[in-house]
């Protein structure tokens, strides 16, 4: 079918929306390594996990065999509120770049959370309600995840406590207000409401908090509250699973027009949007059914894959979680001030890490000023003001499209546009004012981070 | 067709998008009164208008006869970036209200300007470019119009100067930053860059500015710059015309499922979104082809229709524009601090005013705290955080749906959801904190406003 017939935006009908999530683990040559209980150095048991997470999420976390996992009707009902999301043919971007490449992007920003986060928030809140829980807890930094979970908690009728990094709550009062509007309780972290928070406040009075600390407080609250569990917005397998609606919808939409991408690109922080976007295509690749190139775009300031180590590490900086085997800069790595808050994470999804380690994808690190240059160019020609996180994928896609132009080769590029930048305008202001700077960690910075990767039995010989 | 078969969201295909705007004036029993040149007290000539507005917009402004006016391909190309907008069946709102009413809303917020304003910005920028102009000017208060026009100017390659009310530029720095990101020049008004601005600054040093003052500066800049015209975002007939894509898309989508509304509701400030939403249905009503009830929802704090006078008045508070016959509170009426900035206008579209005067629609005034109550209820059950302006329509629709419940009658309600509230979270914070207050002007307040309606030849016998 000629490209002239492809509309600017493809929306699936509600009947065409996925009824199953796609579990890429069913096709992986090497399963991701199990989570390890740091106290015993043995794989985590279901019982270990049940004290913290919802039962159904644990089942999904540990399911390495079923390719398709049904999306419950109750979740699909919520998905209809903000899905299907549009698959857009970037005609104007192609024209501006004067490239022979065909560029498509899957846009997840048309909902109040402003990002793809709602895909997993909906599922996790649904399972919590179904399990008979009364409340859930979580942490949030930049605030997109907190907003998404607040929306889902309101929809399913659950109480939600959001431990929001104190400095974020102060710097982004409007994000906090969206969360409150949806009825959730926002607790600036560290707080006096948990032992973990009180300990940190005693040790560091006046601290602005950290994601690691907020996680500790949220987990403690969940453990100590009857009928309550903790909910996480990225990194874990079940979160990636929920995000596969992105890739499934994109694939269905493209197939309606006979299109298969040559390259699929996403930004990577914890890895959930990227994992969800590539999953159905990667599953085919793992079965030898395609030769698609997968590219994860990460910030040069926090280069987990391009410069990290593949080792067991804590998922949080407070060292309270199980150990996960992943690409990591060290749980004590301090990323520089970088506007893409959602990508400022020391580790990486164990599934994405394993696929990267096994050579099924590559990673690129992009510098902030170049990312914003792409973002502004994109905003002007495609009309959408992207989140800084999402703009990492734009930047990598533009690089690939320009490579096609140099080579005079037509390729089809699909990238994930995860969200909007309406709450990131402080960063845009820096760019517009010409005061934005880049930061790339030195070898010494990295060495300092690596020194915080635990030296323990499971890491023997790995470092 | 049974309601069970109607999807949650209806998206038209690109082929189904309107190719013509709908000029409701072709069917009006009484034409709206002509604009009057205040100096001569005679109707404005095309020449009067050409010094300020684009030629094609003037043709549309004065066209009372053609029912359909073609949307140029160049505008339809831009519309594809953010249209068709979804028509949503408010299943969750219906369920929450437990009403026999069927409720639909046309959602215009899924674009970076966050509102319907882009529909007219696209058209006006296109015509400016086609006329060979190099630049355009406008004013903006809350910032949605300025954002929309900045996007359109970037798309068509025009320079844009946005005179932004100084206090808004300071209170909403992020709105200003979106406009800058799209490459427009933001000038806090009053400024030293125009004679009008310098005069006001000399008279009132340190003033935060006003919309009236910003209009004066923008018009002066356009008049005195070679190849430049002024562009307005509401009130005028051609702006309403461009907004008819809202009503046309909604009507086409509903007709696909055999649905005709009994009631159509929109919020009203300058009247352009409301006029655009109702136009195709009103055109049929004026021809005796339906019995639809049309309701404009305005803020009780600025009740142009429910408590205003039908008279000739200036469109701006600085008294620089032609006189328009409309419902007005007086060009000197000072609306109270009210969060729905887009509805804080003393007058009303002359077309909407005439239709109201002739009894084809009714108006309701709603109080702010009730509006926010509806907004939060809506956000929680339908997922969209509405702009305060849009929430006026939600509030009126909820009232109608509850009336259906009391009467045990099924009615079909369509309302316009013009935009999102992402830049209005200061107002939501007040509501969440319980510190929001209502304000209703006293008879003395109104009398003071009415005293600023010009006493002139065309108003003899009208006041």
Image (spheres, coloured by chain):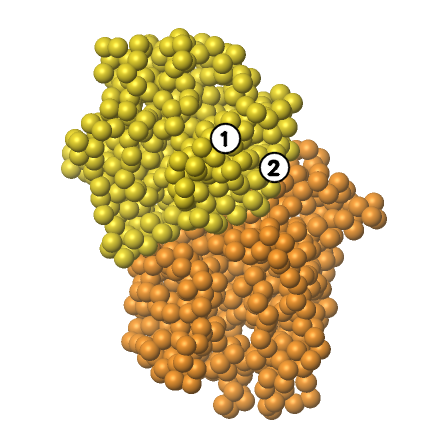
Chain colours: A orange, B yellow
* Residue B167 seen in the figure: yes
**Residue plotted at (17% across, 34% down):** B442
Return the chain for callout 2.
B
Q: Residue B417 at x, y = what percent?
A: 38, 38
Give the quadrant of residue B463. Answer: top left
The residue singled out by tag 2 in the image is: B154
Q: Earlier in the sequence, mark 2 or mark 1?
A: 2
For mark 2, give the secondary structure: helix
Q: Is residue A295 left or right of residue B49?
A: right
Residue B445 vs residue A178: left or right? left
Residue A344 vs A204, above or below: the answer is above
Residue at the image position 46 percent from the left and 59 percent from the top: A144
Task: Between residue B422 and residue B83, name the one nearer to us.
Answer: B422
State the image coordinates of residue A320 (x, y, percent, origin top left): 47, 82
Outermost residue, front direction?
A: B202
Tell me if mark 2 has few (under 14), some (14-19) or many (20+) residues whose alpha carbon lies within 10 angstroms of its own. Answer: many
Give the image quarter of residue B334: top left
Subunit of label 1: B
Q: How far apart are the alpha carbons under marks 2 and 1? A: 28 Å
Quick one: quadrant of the C terminus of chain A?
bottom right
Split into 4 quadrants, where in the image is the N terminus of chain A? top right
The disc at residue B195 is 1
The residue lying furthest to the right in this view is A407
**The residue tagged with tag 1: helix, strand or loop?**
helix
Residue ID at (74%, 52%): A400
- In the picture shown, does residue B324 fall above or below A420? above
When the figure is inspected, residue A326 is found, relative to residue B153, above or below; the finding is below
Q: Is residue A136 visible?
A: no
Instruction: Give how far across and how far down residue B132 sits, in percent.
Output: 65, 23
- Image spot of residue A109 (x, y percent): 51, 50
Q: Classify residue A143 by image quadrant.
A: bottom left
Marker disc for residue A377: none
């Amino acid at each position: 079918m000629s490209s002239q017939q492809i509309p600017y935006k493809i929306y699936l009908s509600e009947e065409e929306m996925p009824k199953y999530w796609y579990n890429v683990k069913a096709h992986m040559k090497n399963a991701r390594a199990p989570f390890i209980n740091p106290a015993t150095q043995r794989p985590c048991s279901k019982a270990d996990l049940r004290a913290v997470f919802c039962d159904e999420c644990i089942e999904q976390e540990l399911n390495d065999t079923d390719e398709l996992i049904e999306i419950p009707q109750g979740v699909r009902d919520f998905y209809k509120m903000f899905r299907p999301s549009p698959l857009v043919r970037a005609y104007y971007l192609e024209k501006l770049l004067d490239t022979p490449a065909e560029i498509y992007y899957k846009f997840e920003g048309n909902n109040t959370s402003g990002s793809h986060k709602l895909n997993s928030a909906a599922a996790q809140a649904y399972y919590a309600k179904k399990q008979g829980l009364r409340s859930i807890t979580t942490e949030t930094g930049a605030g997109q995840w907190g907003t998404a979970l607040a929306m889902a908690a309101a929809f399913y009728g659950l109480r939600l406590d959001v431990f929001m990094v104190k400095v974020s709550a102060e710097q982004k009062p409007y994000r906090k207000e969206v969360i409150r509007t949806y009825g959730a309780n926002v607790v600036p972290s560290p707080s006096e409401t948990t032992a973990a928070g009180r300990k940190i406040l005693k040790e560091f009075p006046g601290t602005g908090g950290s994601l690691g600390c907020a996680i500790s407080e949220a987990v403690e609250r969940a453990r100590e509250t009857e009928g309550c569990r903790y909910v996480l917005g990225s990194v874990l397998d079940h979160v990636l699973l929920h995000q596969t609606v992105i890739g499934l919808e994109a694939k269905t939409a493209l197939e309606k027009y006979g299109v298969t991408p040559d390259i699929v690109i996403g930004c990577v922080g914890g890895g959930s949007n990227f994992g969800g976007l590539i999953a159905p295509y990667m599953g085919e690749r793992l079965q030898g059914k395609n030769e698609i190139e997968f590219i994860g775009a990460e910030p040069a300031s926090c280069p987990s894959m391009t410069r990290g180590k593949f080792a067991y590490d804590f998922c949080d900086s407070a060292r309270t979680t199980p150990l996960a085997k992943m690409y990591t800069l060290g749980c004590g790595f301090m990323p520089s001030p970088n506007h893409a808050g959602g990508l400022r994470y020391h580790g990486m999804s164990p599934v994405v890490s394993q696929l990267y380690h096994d050579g099924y994808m590559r990673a690129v690190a992009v510098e902030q000023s170049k990312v914003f240059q792409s973002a502004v160019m994109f905003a002007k020609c495609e009309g959408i003001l992207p989140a800084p996180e999402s703009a990492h994928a734009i930047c990598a896609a533009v690089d690939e499209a320009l490579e096609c132009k140099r080579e005079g080769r037509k390729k089809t590029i699909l990238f994930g546009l995860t969200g909007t930048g309406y709450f990131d305008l402080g960063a845009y202001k820096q760019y517009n004012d010409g005061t934005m700077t880049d930061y790339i960690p030195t070898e010494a910075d990295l060495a300092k981070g690596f020194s915080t990767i635990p030296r323990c039995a499971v890491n023997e010989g790995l470092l």
